[in-house]
Amino acid sequence: MQHDPAASGKTLLDVQGLTTAYRGLVAISDISITVAAGEIVVVAGANGAGKSTLLKTIAGMEQSRSGTVTLLDRRIDTMPAHEVTALGLAYVPENKRLFPRLTVSDNLRLGSYLHRGKADREAPLDQVFALFPRLKERLQQRAGTLSGGEQQMLAISRALMTRPTLLMLDEPSQGIMPKLVDEIFDAVVAIRKTGVTVLLVEQRLAESLEIADRAYVLQTGRLVLSGNAAEVRDHPDIRRVYLGL
Amino acid sequence: MTAQAFFQVLASGLLMGLLYALIAVGLSLIFGLMDVVNFAHGEFLMVAMYATFGLWAIVGVDPVLLMPLVIAFMFVFGAAVYLGVVRFAMRAKTNSGMVQIFATFGLAILIQGVSQLLFSPDYRSIPASWLGGRTVSIGGVFLPLPQVYGGLISVLAFAGLYLLMSRTDFGKALEATREDQGAVALVGIDRNKVFALGWGLGAALVGLAGSVLAIFYYIHPQVGGPFALVAYVVVALGGFGSVFGALAAGLIVGVVESFAAIAMPPAMKSIPVYLLYLGVVFIRPSGLFGRL
């Protein structure tokens, strides 16, 4: 799906009162968030706050107990995950879920599985190689043999190959050497420039607030704070608890 | 043993081995794809043989020409078995492995019963066909034409399977699904569709073997059993889920059986095959090419 500049500011993703439970234990409760077209939105919070569950539920990989998820005016909370992907929502989970025995090239090629026509399938490749040039050198290598940072790059790239309108990233900086963390954050900014909206889950709050437009803060499964990036950064609780100021 | 006799035994073993491999590969494919052992695999073979026989009886065209129809029918049959039975068995909340075993085992009994009802328990055969009863001689080695045809079909099928797996998007989707069936949704692939197509492909491959076997073998409701037993040995020997392990193991089983048949009484010809199997399982439980 191509980005339409005229649609900027329009609500792309609308989550209302979302509750998800694992075996009776509530992981997220009554969460409402929105993401407008063209934004970078960050969801922050400590370990176990329910950030990953929120993304999983939105992506259709986890069944919600109540609430609604709407993508471009279509209810997606009742859809199987593969249909959500086909509608333009790409999701990079925390553990990446690459196909480790397949080559980098095959992983990328599977990303564009839904698209027909050679031109349609190969166009996003140029974008991906511009973003992460080192993937081009690794095309014939098995995905499982890549370093942690390279695997993250491949996971983001595979998601971009689906040509999403909304990209959801779960802790892309986790388990990566510091030098590459900056590269990943730069890539997120570059991805937004191509017209893809980004919903980012991160523990590195300071860095992610630098690139985000707005932020939501979760605590033990509930939404405790939201606002634009500057507001959240300057909030006394956030400064004390998360930023150590 | 003369050199000529040696080559005679070797060649017939290899030809039978190619057919065993073709019978087994669908079983291995489905197991590798989704960890489900199809206990009705022998009955799939039997259905393909009856399909060939039935079409031959009705249409009166040579079985060689009926082969595309038979494999198309088997493809639909395999996909239907997944969509109608296995899909639901996989949803069992507890002990789904057992549920799958009993579901496919029950299906085997059902298919046998229905075949008996439709075709009676009588042994059937296709008496006159282009290939039936003919032999070719290559350097003094005499080979029955149906088996030569079967070996050729098997080699072509494995070559096609290799191209499918390595060159096509569907092949990559199959491989990705066997790697991580939960993750394919992330690229928009519906794993249920891949599973259904995988069952269709597995059934079409054993259907190919059935359409060949129908030319030179008796057809009856219990014909699948012994072949299924060999197929399980081939799959375990080659490595569960390994397509080319099935080819290698099929050839090994065919050759061992062929030499055993002249070295000992015919009733005992299977013993070395199962001994070999036991040996491999003790020394290398994942099979020759397995990655369990």
Image: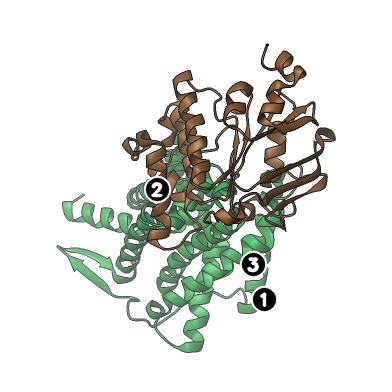
Q: Nearer the viewer, residue B234 or A197?
A: A197
User: What kind of element bears circle 3?
Assistant: helix
Q: Mark 1 is on which residue type?
A: Leu
Residue B98 located left or right of residue A18 = left
Distance CA(mark 3)–CA(mark 1):
10 Å
Instruction: Identify the subunit bearing mark 2.
Output: A
Residue A171, relative to residue B224: is it above or below?
Answer: above
Chain corresponding to brown in the figure: A
Determine crowd level at label 3: few under 14, some 14-19, many 20+ residues with C-alpha closer than 10 A: some
**Same-subunit check for callouts 2 and 3:** no
Q: Mark 2 is on which residue type?
A: Leu
Colour of chain B, in one word, is: green
Q: Do we see residue B124 in this rendering?
A: no
**Same-subunit check for callouts 3 and 1:** yes
Residue A179 located left or right of residue A139 = right
Residue assigned mark 2: A125
Tell me the number on the disc at residue B287: none
Instruction: Identify the subunit bearing mark 1.
Output: B
Tell me the number on the disc at residue B111: 3
User: What kind of element bears circle 1?
Assistant: helix
Q: Do we see residue B115 in this rendering?
A: yes
Residue assigned mark 1: B117
